[in-house]
Image (cartoon, rainbow, N blue to C red):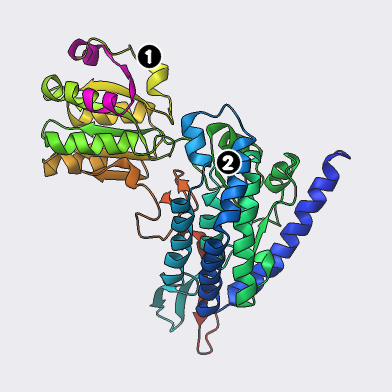
Amino acid sequence: MNAIADPVAALLETAAQAARAAAADLARAPRPVKDLALREAARALRAAAPAVLAANEADVAAAPGLSAAFRDRLALTPARIEAMARGLEEVAELPDPAGRVLSEWTRPNGLVIRRIAQPIGVIGMIFESRPNVAADAAALCLKSGNAVILRGGRESLQSVAAIHAAMAAGLRAAGLPEACVQVAPTADRGFVGAMLRAAGLIDLIIPRGGKGLVTRVMEEARVPVLAHAEGLCHTYVHAAADPAMARAILANAKMRRTGVCGATETLLIDAAVAPSLLPLLVADLAALGCDFRADAAARVLCPGLPAATEADFATEWLDGILSVAVVEGVPAALAHIRRFGSEHTEAIVTEDAAAATEFLNGLDSAVGLWNASTQFCDGGEFGFGAEIGIATGRLHARGPVGLEQLCTYRYHVIGSGQVRP
């Protein structure tokens, strides 16, 4: 480690050691204490709304030339601050995930074995642009008994600091260590590298941001990582889709918020209904400001659409752009998703239950939906209160990561004098 990086690494070590000590206290804290901290943090966040908005305005002003989608992710409004506060209160209402008996059985020799949920320990949360992630991550980590170190992007530093102040107020009110929720003490990019190398100090890294951030984390981390690289989500309009339902779902899935990872990036439409339905879908989305990239079959039906390349079908637009392909049945839709998708979220619109079952069972993706918008891939919408991210890997957790996914487990073995032969 060079001389420039040493001071930054020292800052990380100090923060992580404090987090480990706080995590030990938090793991023993009863539910009423954790819930009080969350409710008091919500109260403090509402009271600090003018200061949070002012900090956010300063962040937005300091980052000119933002795309519309990026600005939407970065910007806070009174409604979004209220949503953060409600999220804290909703997490407080959820059952405590730590200490649950996940399963119990008795062996032939009389040993009783219990699998018990327990916090992971210290979470390192690295995220970009969306300052509300700070509140969501803090709430979920606190309730599940994990300490967290938050490292937001440079573009949201002032917003995150203002949100963190409310979380700290909640911790103080409940008599919990403020080190349960910390913000990186420096904007130096080296702090991220120090987090990624902090094996033994940080137990899990969760990155939430663009492909560049996640790729760096996956390549450099010496700490276990829970992540998704992209949200390249598909909506498949099947031959038996209700046309009105398909139009409503696709408009929401693509254009409700184009910059979220659950936004649909590709429309797959069955050849049997494409002649009658695709022009209507295109007109609906065009009226909402959407642009398109379409395959040859779609352009025959809608001649004015720009041609799509293979790279377009592999692109997470995070913007008002939709890739369009015409497919022949469920197997072809699944083949397209396997080729171009990111195993995040896919939806089918159909009145045919057998087709829906074939589609959902054929997916490798973390989340599959039937007759619903892909933008329901969200911890709050799943009833988790909030989410700390979306996991698309194959181990530990998949889909929205909430309280239960922030716990691991240990075993209690209760005997009556048994010895092993």
Lower position in the chain sequence, tag 1 or tag 2: 2
Q: Residues within 10 Å of mark 1 (few under 14, many from 20)?
A: few
Q: Amino acid at mark 1?
A: Thr
- What secondary structure is marked by label 2? loop
Q: Amino acid at mark 2?
A: Glu
The residue under the point 58% across, 64% down is 146
**Residue 246's quadrant in the figure?**
top left
Q: Which residue is mark 1?
A: 309
Q: Is residue 291 magenta?
A: yes
Residue 374 percent across, percent down from the top left: 31, 41
Image position of 413 (left or right of 326): right
Q: Nearer the viewer, residue 240 or 376?
A: 376
Give the label, 1 or 2, closer to the camera.
2
Q: Residues within 10 Å of mark 2 (few under 14, many from 20)?
A: many
Screen quadrant of the N terminus: top right
Q: Is residue 228 magenta?
A: no
Q: Which residue is mark 2?
A: 128
Q: Nearer the viewer, residue 222 or 95?
A: 95
Residue 107 percent across, percent down from the top left: 41, 78
- What secondary structure is marked by label 1? loop
Residue 2 percent across, percent down from the top left: 86, 38
The residue under the point 23% across, 16% down is 298
The residue range painted magenta reads: 283-301
